[in-house]
Amino acid sequence: MPPAAPVPAYAAQTAAPTAVAMDRAPAYYQTAATAGSSSTPGRAAMWLGLLFPYFGLPIGLAFMMCDDRRRQEIGRACVIWSLVSGVIHLILFFVSIVGMREYFTAAFNAARAAAERGGGGGGLNGY
């Protein structure tokens, strides 16, 4: 039996358009260059959570609401790092408050002394 003659592309499209659509390869392939590194979003979520925990927490929660599993993982990492960093920020806040204890007592004593002096500004009937 002799080999079949090749069919021109336009003839195949008019004869069976669905068969041609199945035979064609997709127009777009995601290559390694366009995909990027898989660890970059995780690192970005970590740094966002560590440096800006008050922004990272709601952003991470929003990512956890997505249907994509990878985005949920990124959101989970962002929330965890935000909570860790939030605790660290609170500890540093209280340490700084304890260190400034003397300044607070001096300011409170000055305010109390000014209140006890009785308003040297004159008020309504003063000079």
Image (cartoon, helix red, strand yellow):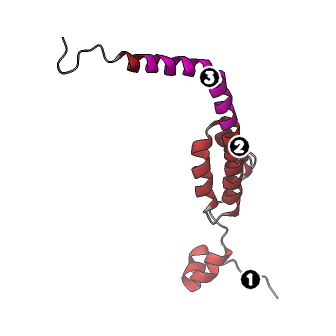
Please report the residue visible at 50 percent of the width from the left and 18 percent of the height from the top. Answer: 109
Front: mark 2 or 3: 3
Name which of mark 1 and mark 3 comes first in the sequence: 1
Q: Cα distance, mark 2 to mark 3?
A: 34 Å
Q: Dot 1, crowdedness within 10 Å: few (<14), some or many (≥20)?
A: few
Residue at the spot x=66%, y=32% of the render? 94
> Which quadrant does the C terminus fall into?
top left
Lateral position of residue 121 relative to residue 18, left or right: left
The secondary structure making up most of the magenta span is helix
Quadrant in the rendering for residue 63: bottom right
Q: Which residue is mark 3?
A: 101
Q: SS at mark 3? A: helix
Q: Say what amino acid the circle numbered 2 marks.
A: Met
As for residue 97 lying within the magenta part, the answer is: yes
Counting residues from the start of the chain, the first of labels 1 and 2 encountered is 1
Q: Residue furthest right?
A: 1
In the rendered image, the residue lying farthest to the bottom is 1
Whether the magenta-drawn stretch holds residue 82 is answered as: no
Residue 37, horizontal then vertical, whole percent: 74, 46
The residue positioned 62% from the left and 27% from the top of the image is: 97
Q: Secondary structure at mark 1?
A: loop
Mark 2 — residue?
A: 46
Q: Is residue 49 left or right of residue 125?
A: right
**Mark 2: secondary structure:** helix
> Is 64 rendered above or below residue 116?
below
Magenta region, residue range? 90-113
Disc 3 marks a residue whose amino acid type is: Arg
